[in-house]
Image (tube, rainbow, N blue to C red):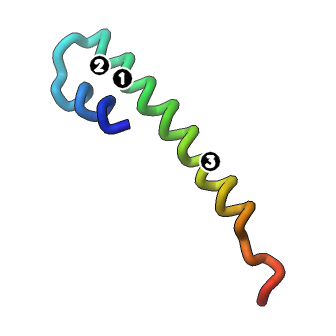
Amino acid sequence: MSRHRLIIVQGGDPTIVDEASRALSNETKIYRNAKREYEKAHCDGWQR
């Protein structure tokens, strides 16, 4: 993810920046979904 941020910040070729932006967006969605699923699987919903 950090490599995509670096490409976006550096600017340069707009095509490459757009690709990096799309890839970063996709990876962020995947990461958030994985984190949410992990938290759901390890919840302490039965303890109060």
- The residue that label 3 is drawn on is 34
Q: Is residue 2 above or below residue 19?
A: below
Q: Is residue 12 left or right of residue 19?
A: left
Q: CA distance from mark 3 to mark 1?
A: 21 Å
**Which class describes the residues within 10 Å of circle 3: few (<14), some (14-19), or many (20+)?**
few
- When asked about the image quadrant of residue 29, the answer is top right
Q: Is residue 28 above or below residue 39?
A: above
Q: Is residue 8 left or right of residue 35?
A: left
Horizontal and vertical percent for residue 44?
74, 77
- For mark 3, give the secondary structure: helix
**Which class describes the residues within 10 Å of circle 1: few (<14), some (14-19), or many (20+)?**
some
Q: Work out whether mark 3 precedes mark 2 in sequence or the reverse, and give the earlier one.
A: 2
- The residue that label 2 is drawn on is 17
Q: Given this view, does label 3 or label 2 mark the residue nearer the observer?
A: 3
The numbered mark at residue 43 is none
Horizontal and vertical percent for residue 19?
38, 17
Q: Are marks 2 and 1 in contact (CB under 8 Å)?
A: yes
- The residue that label 1 is drawn on is 20
Q: Is residue 7 above or below residue 40?
A: above
Q: Which amino acid does the dot numbered 1 rest on?
A: Ala
Q: Residue at x 24, y 26 (%)?
A: 7
- When asked about the image quadrant of residue 47, the answer is bottom right
Q: CA distance from mark 2 to mark 1?
A: 5 Å
Horizontal and vertical percent for residue 15?
31, 9
Q: Given this view, does label 3 or label 1 mark the residue nearer the observer?
A: 3
- For mark 1, give the secondary structure: helix
Q: Residue at x 54, y 44 (%)?
A: 31
